[in-house]
Image: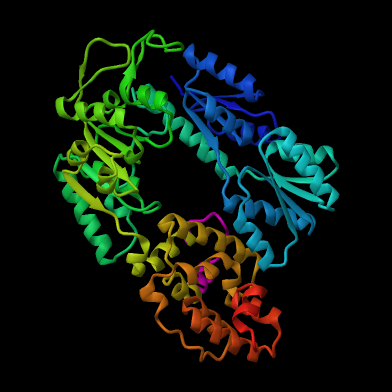
Amino acid sequence: MKPRIVVFSISALAGTLREIARDYAASANIELVPKAYEDALAYARNRYYTDTADVFVAAGSNGAFLQNQLEAPLVIIRTDGFDVMQALASARKASSAVGLVSYEHSFDELVQFARAFDVPLNTRTYRTPEDARRAVRELAQLGVKVVVGSGLVTEIAQEMGLDAILIYSRQGVVKAFEEAIRLAGAKASGGVRRNSQAYTYHTEQDLIGNSLAVEKLRNTIRLCGSIDFSVLIQGETGVGKELVAQSIHTASPRAGKPFVAINCASLTESLLESELFGYEEGAFSGAVKGGRAGMFESAQGGTVFLDEIGDMPLAFQTRLLRILEDNTVRRIGSASSRKVDFRLLAASNVNLQRAVEAGRFREDLYFRLNEMLIQIPPLRERIEDIGELAGYFLRTTPVRVSKSRFDAFLQLALPVLQSLPWPGNIRQLKNVCRRAAVLMLQENDLSSWHRWFPDLIESAEQNLPASQSEQKASPSGNTMNELALAYSRGSKGDRAAIVRKAMDMANGEVNKVAEGLGISRSTVWRLGKGV
């Protein structure tokens, strides 16, 4: 039976959803339902608990509402800065007076982008339909002619006589449908139904880079794959912990069996309990007829991956330890236990040993998980891989920019990219490269690329490790671009000297210095005072 997917939309997004749903007619039954909020919640619960739907899809404030209320697998249609910049590029073709209304998130980086390129951009956020209507009305009063936003926002804008551009990209909808089909497949095969996947695609060869740190990581993955021990994977956010977990599974004798993943930080305690342990029919109100297997049963013969295990409540830690010790699991509402066979991989972006010392994590469970330990290095400790990673992210964006343009950008930007601390690691670098790809469509002069990322340049002074910030950057450059590169790598004292030299070169014109160095006018005045 094909996956049964219900998609909720009452806005302009419905047309795009309907068009893309036709492409999946052969692989899934996708039903578009014009309901939202309480009506959508009641409808979804009825369909899920009567077992006539597998997965639900929604977007925007409607999706956020369902995510907080619905005890069923839900996929949210996401937008990111890349989607927004594409929508803004389309909006600017119609008018220079553009407004952006986004759900909750304000996309601060776009405000910086607009300021750097002197693009008039007014932004608002909303949580309810009333908020959205108020936001659009305010923008209209400010003279905005084109509004970028969700389906709800674009409909309101059109009602008020404004042009509107949908913030969602076709690619974002496709990704949501693909995820919904994967989740439905996991359910059909007994897999976990939410925040999980039953199939794995990555191997250690998908790790990009040739540094010693990455080669060591690949070797460790192969070793962990050959030994059927529990593995604890630690690393900062954005380093690729799930990719490593999938690669261990793929390298193991369990590769042909399920890989079942769940994020311990993303579920409420009640939902986490049913997902982990499963339940019997009648165990609680709304329990599906026949009951359901939990993730440990679903992974029979395969691998369980618990992401962000440091956020698992202490009560669940005790039950998890018991499962690991006797290889049995008891469903909610059951009087008997079932034998299970799985290999456990766990990941955390916090140091679990310190969590043990603070009383937030069980010491006995920590030692049970830590049969093998993988510490993934942060990006700042493998800077020789940044060029290869950035090149890959630039080439794989859907933006149509020539390879020669990407190469030219990398040649100019790489020294600065390699000097940054990257608190968001590989995920942050990917987002920067996607933003750069969009901006290359609008800017021909790559030599002023640093103006595209004022947030990166300004944060370098505060965030660079001491060993780097103490390195002296010579203000002896003969062009503004050379001074901009030196500024991005210099310490506080060096930067003041660089600003003063730039002021001399620009004959004291603050605007030219701010534009040339990619910094704000206030920073020019602060560092160059007395010039």
Image position of 298 (left or right of 126): left
Residue at x 71% of width, y 84% of height: 509
The answer to which quarter of the image holds residue 86 is bottom right
Report whether residue 247 is seen: no
Q: Quadrant of the N terminus?
A: top left
Q: Nearer the viewer, residue 494 or 186?
A: 494
Q: Which residue appears at 17% of the width and 41% of the height?
A: 367
Tell me if residue 511 comes above or below residue 330 in the rendering.
Answer: below
Residue 51 in magenta stretch: no
| Residue 230 in the image: above or below residue 146 | above
Query: In the rendered structure, which segment of residues is drawn in magenta?
Result: 395-409
The image quadrant of residue 187 is top left
Does residue 403 show up magenta in the picture?
A: yes
- Residue 419 visible within the image: yes
Residue 31 in percent (x, y) is at 58, 23
Identify which residue is drawn at 71% across, 54% down: 90
Q: Is residue 74 left or right of residue 500?
A: left
Q: In this view, does 128 lie to the left or right of 201?
A: right
